Amino acid sequence: MNKKNKSRSVYSTITRASGATPTRTRQWVIVSAVVLAVITYVHRVAISQAAPFIMADLDLSLVEMGWVFSAFALSYALLQVPGGWMSDWKGPKRVLTIIVLWWSLFTAATGWAWNLVSLLAARFLFGAGQGGGFPVLTKTFMTWLPQKERVRAQGIMWLAARWGGAFTPLLFVYLLQFFSWRQAFGLIAILGFVWAAFFWRWYRDKPREHPGVNAAEMAILQNAEESASGHGDVPWKRFFRSRSVWLLWIQYFCIGYGTYFYITWLPTYLQEDRGQSLEQSALLSILPLFMAGLGSLSSGLILGPIERWVGSTIKTRRFIASLGFTLAGILLIFSLYFTDPFWALVIIGASSFASDFVMPTSWGACMDMGGKYAGSLSGSMNMAGNLAGFVAPAMVAYILLWSNQNWALTFYVSCGVYIIGAVCWLFIDPVSPLDRPSQY
């Protein structure tokens, strides 16, 4: 009897014996992840809308502002693996509470900057805190959700993350009507402090320790709980020997390169190249991340049915991811042929939808390949994606400098990066576990 059938058998036995209906405490883990995903992107994207005010107030050039964006991405990337590894070792409760408090502090500290160096420091330390966020949330899914619910949960979480980022420009423009950009960063920082307090009181690293979980729900989660804390001996050699892991890292770099344009330079592009006002650019900036969220959700919802129809998880994930990358690149170039800013952003939004179609497949691969080391593997993948976040904002600034403000050229570069991601997925095995030495 395989693990899945065994789990069902145990669940049926306990249910019949106790007459109990499984509780749904695990759904609140998804809710907490969704709320934090929104807060994460509110804190992260706010600086894109504040950039013109920051540049004017601190007398920063375009290239200097590009390095401010990149400072966040560098530390964010470097702390992915330590964050994921700590959650594998110590469990998500302590790790996630500490890092949310840390990054919320430096969200507020962004508003305290008085020159380029202090702003770079604040954004670097802010990124260091956010670095472990999504890898640790992935660890909570591994521990609290049965396998069939994990990819869907990732789709819902990334929908929330993208939508949090999508509506942040409007939120920030609204705040700027009443507060300075400095005060606005302090206000949004409060969200993180409140979330951390609730999470610390409610969450348990092991479902069986939570008072809201009954025996019937525990039967559903017994295999998932095997991934709880206490696995600090990550098999890094096995990861580095795996072709699929390397390709997984590269393709996520490709997602990150395109996405970081939307959370850094998009408002500036709309104002400088498309002639939009601050308010107009804030409204149009909603579209790419709004559509990205729909892409993540749609992918998470259809992957299961398509897998059952095709009969192969590997083929389904390869097809969905390669299609998403290819369409993302084509649509990005197509947007350049629209002179109306609204329709151009609709097409860019469609490109973003296609790019985020890859997200649940990527994080699902981390959970299936990483097993009890999912926190560490997802952290390493997210590190690769956010190294792109370090490269992309500065790269865009230098392309504009060298090409006399040719924004179209930045789109062609992003298209090329997306095509590389599509090719990677043709050769990834996204299901074979790497946490079992007997497999190698």
Image (tube, rainbow, N blue to C red):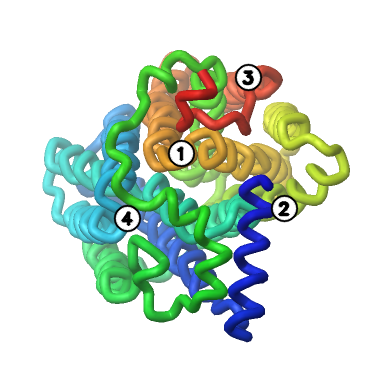
Relative to 130, 312 lies left or right: right
Foreground disc of the pair 4, 2: 4
Q: Residue furthest right?
A: 309
Q: Residue at x 48, y 35 (%)?
A: 370
Distance in Å between CA atoms under marks 4 and 3: 31 Å
Residue at image position (51%, 75%) is 215
Q: Amino acid at mark 3?
A: Cys
C-alpha gap between disc 4 and disc 1: 33 Å
Residue 222 percent coordinates (x, y):
50, 59
Residue 286 x, y percent position in the rendering: 57, 56
Q: Position of residue 365 (x, y in %)?
A: 58, 36
Task: Report the residue at 67% width, 70% height from top.
Answer: 12
Upstream in the sequence, badge 4 or badge 1? 4
Q: Which residue is mark 1?
A: 265
Which numbered disc flags the more N-terminal residue, 1 or 3? 1
| Marks 1 and 3, how far apart at CA | 27 Å
Write down the quadrant of residue 32 in the picture: bottom left
Quadrant of residue 391 in the image? Answer: top left
- Expressed as whole percent of the image width and height from the top left, the position of residue 138 reads 45, 49
The residue at which mark 2 appears reads as 298
| Quarter assignment of residue 93 | bottom left
Q: Nearer the viewer, mark 1 or mark 3?
A: 3
Taking 75 as reference, is 134 above or below it? below
At label 1, the amino acid type is Trp
Q: What amino acid does circle 4 point to?
A: Pro
Residue of label 4: 92
Q: Nearer the viewer, residue 318 or 56?
A: 318
Q: How many C-alpha atoms fall within 10 Å of the one at disc 4: few (<14), some, or many (≥20)?
A: many
Frontmost of labels 4 and 3 is 4
